[in-house]
C-alpha cells in the first residue's frame, strides 16, 4: 500500500523560503551530526524521566515477528525507551543517537527504524522553528560578501539536508517492505514549538501509514531542495536587504514592488549567471520534479489509504473518526489528523480540495518525465483547482471573475526539457510582464527598473 504524505506535505512548500541562514551557526553536541541545530541542555535524561509513557511498551518488547537470537534485547529495549524520552523532550539529535545505538545492537529492528524516521522529521521541524527566529535578525552581508546567501543555502542543503533525507528514505523503504504491521507509540511528541509553546504535537501510535506520510513529506522537501541546487543563486542580496515594500501596499503594489526588485537583480552586470544552471543542475531539476510529483500524488493516496485501515482508530497519529464504532470507515466519517484534530464540515471539504490540488500538481509535475508510474495519464494542471483558495492572483487578473477559466497549465515539460539558460529568461520575462501590468501613476517599486 503506497500511502506517502498527507497533510504535512502541504507545508513542504514553506521550506525554501526558510533556508536563508548562516551555515554552522549552531553546533550539535550530539555525535549524530546535525550541525544546524544546537542541543538543549535543560531536558530530562532517560534516567530521571520515569513517567509511564517511557516504560517499555508492548511494541518495545520482543514479539515473534521480531525474534532474532542475534539481538541483545536487554540492551536494545532501554535504548528505544531512552530514544522516545528524547523525542518527548524535543531533542531529535539525542533521540537519533539512542535509536542508532539500538540499531547497532539489533540491525533492522523496526522500533529503531521508526524512531529514526520520527527523529529526522522532528529535526526538520525543530530546525524550521529555530531558524524562523534567527532570520528575523539575520544580517545577510556580515562580511560584505553580497553573494553569500545563495551559496549558504546550497551548502546547508548539500551538507545537512540531503543526508537526512536519504536516511529517512532508507528506513521507510525497509519498514514498508518488511515491517508493514509494526506500530510505535510515543507521547508527547512536539514537532513544532514557537516561543516555548507546542504548536504541532504528533504524539500517539505511529503505524506504517504515518511512516509513509512522513516519507512523502521528506520527499517533497528533497524535491524543493534539489530545485534550489539546480541554479546559480549568486546575486547582490543588498538589493533586497536595503529595500522595503511601500507602507500599506495592497496586492497589486506588492507584486509591482517585488517584480521591480527582481528586474534590478537581473540587470546587475556583476551576476550575469543568476538562475542559470549550475554544473549538473539539469539533472537535479529532473529529480526535483519527479520527487515533488510523486509526493503530490501520494499525498492524495495517503488519505484514501487511511480509510482502508480496519480496527480501532484511537491514538493513531493519522486516522478517521469511527462514528458508528464498527472498526471500518463508512461514508461521512471524517479524518483525524495532527494539529486540526477531527475534521468536520468546512475543514473536511477544505482538506479534500487541497488533496485534489496536491494530486493534480503531482501528476502535472510528472507529465513527460521519467517516473513511469503505471496508470498515470499525461496531465496538465487545471487552473480551476485554485478556486477554493480565493486566490489573489485571480482577483488581480480580473476582479470580476468568481472562478478561474478552465485552463490547463503544462508544468512537467519545463522541468524535463528546460530552456538552456535554466530559469533566467522565463523568470525575467514573467517579472517584466507583471511589473508592467501593475505599474501606474500611484504605484512605485523601490529599486525597480
Image: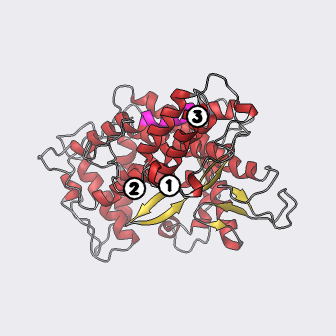
Q: Which residue position holds label 2?
A: 43
**Is 413 rendered above or below residue 124?**
above
Residue 97 position within the rendered picture, expressed as x and y whole percent measured from the top left: 44, 38
Q: Mark 3 or mark 1: which comes first in sequence?
A: 3
Can residue 374 be seen here? The reply is no
Residue 388 sits in quarter: bottom right
The local crowd at label 2, few if under 14, some if 14 to 19, many if 20 or more residues have their Cα within 10 Å, is some
Rendered residue at 48%/33% (across/down): 101
The local crowd at label 3, few if under 14, some if 14 to 19, many if 20 or more residues have their Cα within 10 Å, is few
Q: CA distance from mark 3 to mark 1?
A: 22 Å
Rendered residue at 55%/37% (across/down): 291
**Observer-nearest of 232 and 266:** 232
User: 255 left or right of 212?
Assistant: left
Residue 197 position within the rendered picture, expressed as x and y whole percent measured from the top left: 43, 67
Q: How many marks?
A: 3
The chief SS type of the magenta part is: helix
Residue 308 position within the rendered picture, expressed as x and y whole percent measured from the top left: 80, 49
Q: Which residue position holds label 3?
A: 74
Which image quarter is the C terminus in?
Answer: bottom left
- Residue extending farthest to the bottom is 248
Which residues fall within the magenta stretch?
Answer: 162-173
Q: Which residue position holds label 1?
A: 88
Amino acid at each position: 500500500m503506497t500511502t506517502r504524505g498527507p497533510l504535512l506535505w502541504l507545508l513542504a512548500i514553506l521550506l525554501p523560503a526558510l533556508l536563508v541562514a548562516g551555515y554552522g551557526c549552531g553546533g550539535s553536541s550530539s555525535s549524530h551530526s546535525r550541525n544546524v541545530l544546537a542541543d538543549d541542555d535543560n531536558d530530562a535524561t532517560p534516567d530521571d524521566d520515569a513517567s509511564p509513557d517511557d516504560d517499555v511498551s508492548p511494541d518495545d518488547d520482543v514479539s515473534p515477528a521480531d525474534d532474532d537470537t542475534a539481538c541483545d534485547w536487554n540492551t536494545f529495549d532501554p535504548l528505544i525507551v531512552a530514544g522516545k524520552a528524547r523525542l518527548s523532550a524535543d531533542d531529535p539529535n539525542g533521540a537519533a543517537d539512542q535509536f542508532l545505538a539500538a540499531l547497532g545492537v539489533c540491525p533492522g529492528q523496526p522500533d529503531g527504524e521508526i524512531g529514526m524516521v520520527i527523529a529526522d522529521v522532528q529535526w526538520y521541524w525543530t530546525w524550521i522553528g529555530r531558524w524562523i527566529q534567527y532570520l528575523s535578525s539575520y544580517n545577510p552581508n556580515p562580511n560584505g560578501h553580497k553573494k553569500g546567501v545563495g551559496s549558504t543555502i546550497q551548502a546547508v542543503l548539500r551538507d545537512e539536508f540531503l543526508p537526512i533525507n536519504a536516511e529517512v528514505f532508507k528506513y521507510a523503504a525497509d519498514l514498508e517492505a518488511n515491517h508493514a504491521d509494526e506500530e510505535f507509540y510515543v507521547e508527547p511528541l512536539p514537532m513544532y514549538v514557537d516561543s516555548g509553546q507546542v504548536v504541532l504535537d504528533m504524539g500517539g501510535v505511529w503505524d506504517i501509514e504515518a511512516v509513509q506520510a512522513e516519507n512523502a513529506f521528506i520527499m517533497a522537501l528533497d524535491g524543493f531542495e534539489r530545485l534550489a541546487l539546480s541554479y546559480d543563486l549568486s546575486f547582490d542580496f543588498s538589493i533586497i536587504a536595503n529595500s522595503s515594500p511601500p507602507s500599506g501596499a495592497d496586492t497589486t503594489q506588492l507584486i509591482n514592488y517585488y517584480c521591480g526588485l527582481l528586474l534590478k537583480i537581473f540587470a546587475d552586470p556583476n551576476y550575469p549567471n543568476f538562475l542559470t544552471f549550475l554544473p549538473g543542475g539539469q539533472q537535479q531539476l529532473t529529480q526535483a520534479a519527479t520527487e515533488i510529483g510523486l509526493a503530490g500524488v501520494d499525498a492524495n493516496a495517503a488519505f484514501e489509504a487511511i480509510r482502508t485501515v480496519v480496527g480501532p482508530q484511537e491514538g493513531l497519529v493519522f486516522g478517521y473518526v469511527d462514528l458508528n464504532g464498527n472498526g471500518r470507515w463508512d461514508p461521512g466519517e471524517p479524518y483525524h489528523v495532527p494539529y486540526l484534530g477531527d475534521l468536520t464540515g468546512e475543514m473536511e471539504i477544505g482538506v479534500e480540495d487541497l488533496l485534489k490540488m496536491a494530486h493534480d500538481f503531482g501528476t502535472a509535475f510528472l507529465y513527460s518525465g521519467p517516473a513511469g508510474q503505471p496508470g498515470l495519464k499525461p496531465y496538465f494542471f487545471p487552473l480551476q483547482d485554485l478556486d477554493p483558495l480565493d486566490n489573489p492572483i485571480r482577483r488581480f487578473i480580473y476582479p470580476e471573475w468568481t472562478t478561474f477559466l478552465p485552463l490547463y497549465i503544462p508544468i512537467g515539460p519545463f522541468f524535463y526539457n528546460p530552456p538552456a539558460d535554466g530559469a533566467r529568461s522565463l523568470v525575467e520575462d514573467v517579472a517584466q510582464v507583471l511589473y508592467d501590468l501593475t505599474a501606474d501613476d500611484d504605484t512605485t517599486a523601490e529599486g525597480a527598473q
